[in-house]
Amino acid sequence: MSRAVKAARPLIALSTASVFPDRTPDAFEIAARLGYDGVEVMVSADAVSQDVDVLRRLADYHGVPVLAVHAPCLLISQRVWGREPWGKLIRAKEVAEQLDARVVVVHPPFRWQRDYARDFGPGLERMHEETDVVFAVENMYPLRAGGAEMAPYAPHWNPLLMDSPHVTLDLSHTSVSGSDALAMAAELGSRLAHVHMADGTGITNRDEHLVPGRGTQPCASLLGKLAAGGYSGTVVLEVNTRRAPSHETRVADLAEALDFTRRHLGGPALAGGGHASDRQSQADDRHDRADGGRGQAGDRRDRADGGGGQAGDGRDQAGDGRARAGDGDGRAAPGTAGTGTARMGTAGPDPVGPLGSALPASR
């Protein structure tokens, strides 16, 4: 298949939250191993997820670009990057700009964040005027108990009912809210900027984030409609693998999720994760597909480093290093060895578990 045909499908990214309780560096390694087009960084208590320099080195080392940044606006990340919500978004924007990521994913404000909620829509508009980064507001869900319903978000949990020019559609969240994902996507139209692909079975208050195809959400149908409609955003696999009994089982789940998504977007499916040569070919193509080849991003990094050739040579050396590391030379990837922030990253609470998206009652 020609490179031009490959470029026609949306990019498929792996959320770093999908490898929990493994850490952010593991997500980059798995994404490269399986042939994902890039990663979405969930900014969390993991120190590596907060360090733009380490993230850049991980992206270059593994040949896996950061395509999106998920701002630390979950209940479990209320103290990450401070407690001021606008400060978090400004910092997420700055990280996205430095990593040449296109999207910052943000949740609606919590109800107790009254000032933030009151200015949420106009504030995002003002920020969008200052940057090319897209702030995509994610659909959430209400909580139900004893026949009553309580929404912990304001102005609403549903971006369809908010003045949000760009939206992230999460299919695990549509499962919890009982929403029609296909109808939401159709009504959003051009506002649909980003997709979190996952599945769910509709159990009350349970945000499951299953591997797509293992629940009742119309994952395959949505992917087909995105491909047919010329969707130009990114599809991010944000699935919960915390119960996987081993690292290899987790990798197998993420390979299955990628295969499902690629197949229903109309791209080539790789049985069992694909042959190593196929995955290497995909890794060679990733930078060409992302943001029109990401050539301009590479040029900017080269100029910032004081010489284009040095940055390009560094990435080539990183690629050679990956091959040697695969042969057992012992060279560690960024964020997995050494001292300081690069070594001190810890998994923290599960970002796609019971506390990841809403309130403790969501369990």
Image: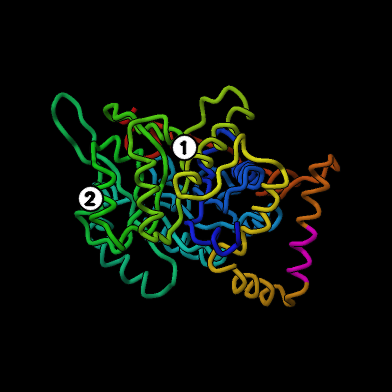
Residue shown at the point (60%, 74%) measured from the top left: 296
Residue at x 60% of width, y 36% of height: 271
Magenta residues span 310-317
- The image quadrant where one finds the C terminus is top left
Compared to 217, does 161 lie above or below?
below
> Which residue is depicted at the point 26% across and 63% down?
121
Q: Which residue is mark 1?
A: 239
Q: Residue 11: where, in percent of width, then height?
A: 51, 55
Mark number, residue 43:
none
Question: Which secondary structure, mark 2?
Answer: loop
Q: Position of residue 321 (x, y in %)?
A: 80, 52
- Seen in the image, is 7 located left or right of residue 171? right
Q: Amino acid at mark 2?
A: Ala
Give the vertical position of 294 relative to 37 (above or below). Answer: below
Residue under numbered circle 2? 154
Closer to the chain start, of discs 1 and 2, is 2
Residue extending farthest to the front is 1
Is residue 164 within the magenta segment?
A: no
- Per the model, the C-alpha gap separating discs 1 and 2 is 25 Å
> Looking at the image, do the residues carrying marks 1 and 2 touch, with CB atoms under 8 Å apart?
no
Q: What's under tag 1, amino acid-wise? A: Val
Q: Name the quadrant containing residue 64.
A: bottom right
Badge count: 2
Q: Quadrant of the N terminus?
A: bottom right
Q: Is residue 316 left or right of residue 204?
A: right
Nearer the camera: disc 1 or disc 2: 1
Q: Dot 2 surroundings within 10 Å: few (below 14), some, or many (20 or more)?
A: some
What is the crowding at mark 1: few (fewer than 14 residues within 10 Å), some, or many (at least 20)?
A: many
Side of 64 relative to 114 (left or right)? right
Percent x, y of residue 26: 63, 41
Residue 200 horizontal/vertical position (percent): 35, 32
Secondary structure of the residue carrying tag 1 is loop
